[in-house]
Amino acid sequence: MGQAFLVYPWSFHMQKRHPTGTRHSWILAAFAFILSIVSLPGILPGQTTPAQPANPPAPQSPVQPTTPPQPGNPQQPSSPQTPESGTTQVPGAGVSVQEQQGSAPSQPSQQPEAEARITPGQAKELFRSVDVILQFASQDTGLPIEHRVGRHLITREAVEKYVDKRMKDDKDAQRLEQSRLVLEKFGLLPPNYDLHGEFLRLLGEQVAAYYDPKAKSVNLLDWVPPETQKPVLAHELTHALQDQKIGLEKWERAGGAKDDKPLPDQQEYVVEEAQAARQCVAEGQAMVVLLNYTLAPMNKDVVSAPEIFDAMRAAMADDKDSPVFSAAPMFLRESLMMPYTWGTDFVRAVLVKKGKDAAFAGLLENPPVDTRQIMQPQSYLSNRVVPPLTVPDLDKLVAPDYKRFDFGGMGEFDVYLLAKQYGGDNAPPNYYPHWRGGYYFAAQAKDAPKDRIAMLYFSRWDSPEAAHDFAELYGDYLPKRYKKVSWVVKCSERDGPACSEEKAATEQGAVAMEFHGNDLLIMEGFDDSVTQRAGDVLLNGPSMPASAPKAGN
Ligand SMILES: [Zn+2]
């Protein structure tokens, strides 16, 4: 699922360019922002002054609220001065206020107060700080400033409306349904989960600011206090520098197609992992700069003060200010956090081992290829790559009684998620490091109800024992995913890795787990002939020719 499970935090309007068309990833485009939960003020409890970048900022405009903030009514529509159309700025609803246009941006001051908004004076100061913080980010990363970064102030309502509109698109709604069914099948979402509604709620809670690579500008939020936005600016302006260096959108596609068309499975398999890894690089670098910006007044940075990472995690764990986030299913929470948590650790590891050039320009030029390299930085540092599996012609495999519903890679991070879902918080390290490849293929029987899918999940491990361990975890969780589970064939402790097959009956058909060496094939809801054929092709037979193998660049 790889990419599917990740956010697109640096860009807000990605779904139209998402390369695969069948993936879930576009959904999370709604979260094309830094999550406020990772940028909460107070990461450093002792810090009382805002970070002072290398160049002193211009004198601050006095903060003079023109109207008192009126919290407690955040649902109030925003001002009429905020056009939701008629501006060319993407995401389209933003109020574009150029710094050079004169004194204070006039629009916010005219707005009837719906919730606390920053004042014109604050906005002016925030706009001015963009250049100062950009300078800091450039020094911190070694990435040059090629050109000026635009800046816009936008309203909460504008952001929400835009997302809502995009998500109501028919094609998008169809994909959302596809994602939901696959995730529910794996037990990662509760049945009939309101994915659309949840995304909107999470978005409303989590957006903090974002960089728009199409407009080459940073979007500041008119309802977030300036002091909160400054470290976030350090983060977003790092994206601007990345963008100026390699062109974020194209780079993040990692060889995937620009249009909406699905990729051949073999290519999809490689590309979505590469995309996930690159996203971790983009976010990890931006987080390192955010943290360095926060530490700068104390003359420290993430290398000299690694404890900042603990503080950051503690801030994330303390999610009482984020009720929607904290109530979301584990899968959503972990997927959203992944680029920030694992990505930041990864970038820091490269920074410590190989220095600034390797950790910034170097990672952009020579990015990790999969989530394994992110989660185990040593494999990136020593240039060890797990070779991609060869994906056979899966449509042919299930024809004529079943037809394709969805395909996706199951990378190391996906195994992490499954292990956490099935085995609890402490389980993942026992499984994901043993990952050596995997993918799923969801299909529908021709006469099956619309919401009923069958699932093929092929995985490779570093040993037969690891394959059996994962199968046991998977099997133990079946009763939580099906109402009725009765084992027909079950491996026993003393069979060890010699056991070659397990089988259970459920109210939605058979679940078969077949082993061959390091490989594990799980078939759920297929009839016997397809299960048999899949075993022959995937485990025992000569592998079928792959469709258009092509790695991401
Ligand atoms: Zn970001």
Image (cartoon, rainbow, N blue to C red):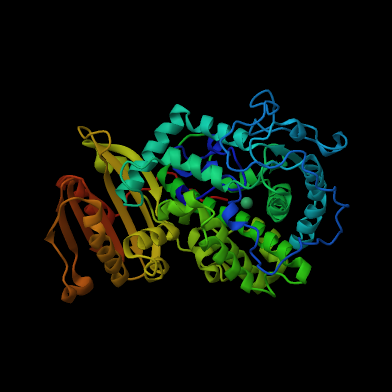
Residue 82 shown left or right of residue 75 in the figure: right
Q: For this rendering, which residue is in front, 246 or 66?
A: 66
Residue 401 shown left or right of residue 416 in the figure: left
Q: For this rendering, which residue is in front, 104 or 199?
A: 104
Quadrant position of residue 492: bottom left
In the rendered image, the vertical position of residue 37 relative to residue 224, given as above or below:
below
Looking at the image, can residue 392 be seen?
no
In the rendered image, the vertical position of residue 290 relative to residue 20, given as above or below:
below
Quadrant position of residue 539: bottom left
Q: Residue furthest top?
A: 86
Q: For this rendering, which residue is in front, 124 or 310?
A: 124
The x and y percentages for residue 68 are: 71, 41
The x and y percentages for residue 439 are: 37, 52
Q: Residue at x 30, y 47 (%)?
A: 185
Q: Residue at x 65, y 62 (%)?
A: 42
The x and y percentages for residue 117 are: 69, 41
Quadrant position of residue 110: top right
The x and y percentages for residue 45 are: 65, 67
In the rendered image, the vertical position of residue 245 relative to residue 221, given as above or below:
below
Looking at the image, can residue 368 be seen?
yes
